[in-house]
Amino acid sequence: MKEFDKIHFVTSNRNKYEEASEIFGRYKLRLEWVNISVEEVQSDLLLDVILWKGYDILKILGNVPFIVEDTGLFINYLNGFPGTYSSYVYKSIGCKGILKLLEGVEDRTAYFLSYGLLHMKNNIFKLFKVRIDGIISFEERGMGGFGFDPIFIPEGHKITYAEMGPSVKNNFSHRGKLFNMIAKYILSRRLVM
Ligand code: ITT
């Protein structure tokens, strides 16, 4: 039974689309980029943000299969900051600002948390969650990636996401794992043929 012709990925961030699309390509699945930016609800909880995002997109796109994703960088020493405010914080103080806040700080542990919400049809959603632990480096390293990639070293590695290059980052990153999970779910449910 054929359920989806294509799946829309709704994001205003081209880098996110390219990473997700590369993962889906490994499963011969096609993602269609829908470049819409929705105003995000102000909450400390990423779960609130993703659920509202899904609801808002449903009102815009209607009854079509789509995915939305929301990610935040949570730094333990800063009590989870920037968390759900990652986008604003990146645009305002960037990686340099984060490094400044952590000057002289020993506890550099942090994690990326990502939620993905898949709308199948008729208001039926499936929620996916991935957390990747790591540390904040002492300086920006690497030319690849985007956002906080130059300062995040995932656990078990010595290099930042930005030093890995896109395909290797996708093997270990929050988004890589998230879209792997979503692709496997779609195939296991035979939602795409
Ligand atoms: P959409 O909400 O339109 O999808 P966005 O860029 O606002 O795009 P998020 O809210 O999910 O996406 O992410 C918030 C910020 O966190 C983002 O702007 C980046 O600065 C940072 N970020 C997200 N994913 C990242 C990643 O894989 N590597 C580094 N930084 C990331």
Image (cartoon, grey):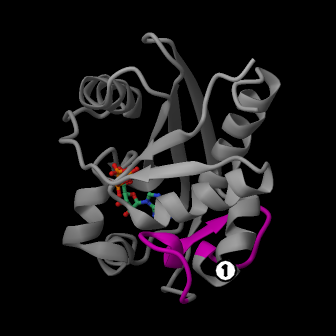
Q: Does the magenta run of residues contain 162?
A: no
Disc 1 beta carbon < 8 A from ligand 1? no
Query: Which residue is at a point 19% across and 35% down the rendered structure image?
Result: 42
Main secondary-structure element of the magenta-colored stretch: loop
Query: Position of 153 compared to 83: left or right?
Result: right
Count of labels in the image? 1
Check the picture and name the quadrant holding the N terminus.
Answer: top right
Check the picture and name the quadrant holding the C terminus.
Answer: top right
* Camera sees residue 112: yes
Q: Which residues are magenta?
A: 143-161
Residue 6 drawn at (x, y percent): 57, 39
Three-letter amino acid code at disc 1?
Answer: Gly
Of 49 and 155, nearer the camera is: 49
Query: Position of 46 compared to 26: left or right?
Result: left
Tell me the SS state at disc 1: loop
Query: Which residue is at a point 25% across and 28% down the rendered structure image?
Result: 56
Of 107 and 39, nearer the camera is: 39
Residue 85 drawn at (x, y percent): 27, 50
Residue 144 drawn at (x, y percent): 56, 83
Residue indicated by mark 1? 165
